[in-house]
Amino acid sequence: MSSKGYNYLKVDEKKMKRMISNRESARRSRMKKEQHMKDLNDQIFYLTKKRDEMLLKIEGIAKENTKMEMENMVLRSQKHELEKRLEYANQVCGWGDGDGDVSLASMGGVQEPWIRPWEQKQPSTSMPVMSSSIGFSIF
């Protein structure tokens, strides 16, 4: 063979090695791309599942929040009603924030002995109360 023919063989051999190397590199690149796509699909599946779980959790929390808001409204209403009752009771008993002169008698009611007993008539001091083993007696 001539040196020219030998050079062609060397060039063909180099081309062949380069072609094989390129094919192997392309194969590795395809495999890497395929693995990357698989990883992305797995991540999509995982994140979709997590999103669905969070949406269910948010829905449950929203329902619980609505329930609590309704309960809170009821409690506020009850509180308001109880405050009004307490204010009325304080006015009736004369314990209000006013001058303290409000009483059942001044409101046209009858003074009962169990309401503000400290304002009830006491026995006269001319009749002393004595105690004995039998009980109390008034002289």
Image: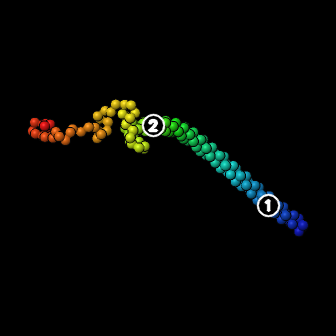
Kind of residue sitting beneath label 1: Arg
Dot 2, crowdedness within 10 Å: few (<14), some or many (≥20)?
few
Apparent side of residue 48 relative to residue 10 in the rendered image (left or right): left
Considering the numbered disc 2 on the image, is that residue within a helix, a strand or a loop?
helix
Location of residue 20 in the rendering, given as x and y in whole percent from the top left corner: 77, 57
Residue 16 visible in the snapshot = yes
- Check disc 2 and report the residue beneath it: 84
Question: Relative to 20, is 56 on the left or the right?
Answer: left
Q: How many marks?
A: 2
**Relative to residue 48, is residue 114 depicted above or below?**
above
Front one among 133 and 139: 139
Image coords of residue 80 (percent x, y): 47, 38
Please state if 61 lies on the left or on the right of 119 as rendered.
right
Is residue 1 at least partly visible in the picture? no
Q: Which residue is mark 1?
A: 18
Q: Nearer the viewer, residue 46 or 97?
A: 97
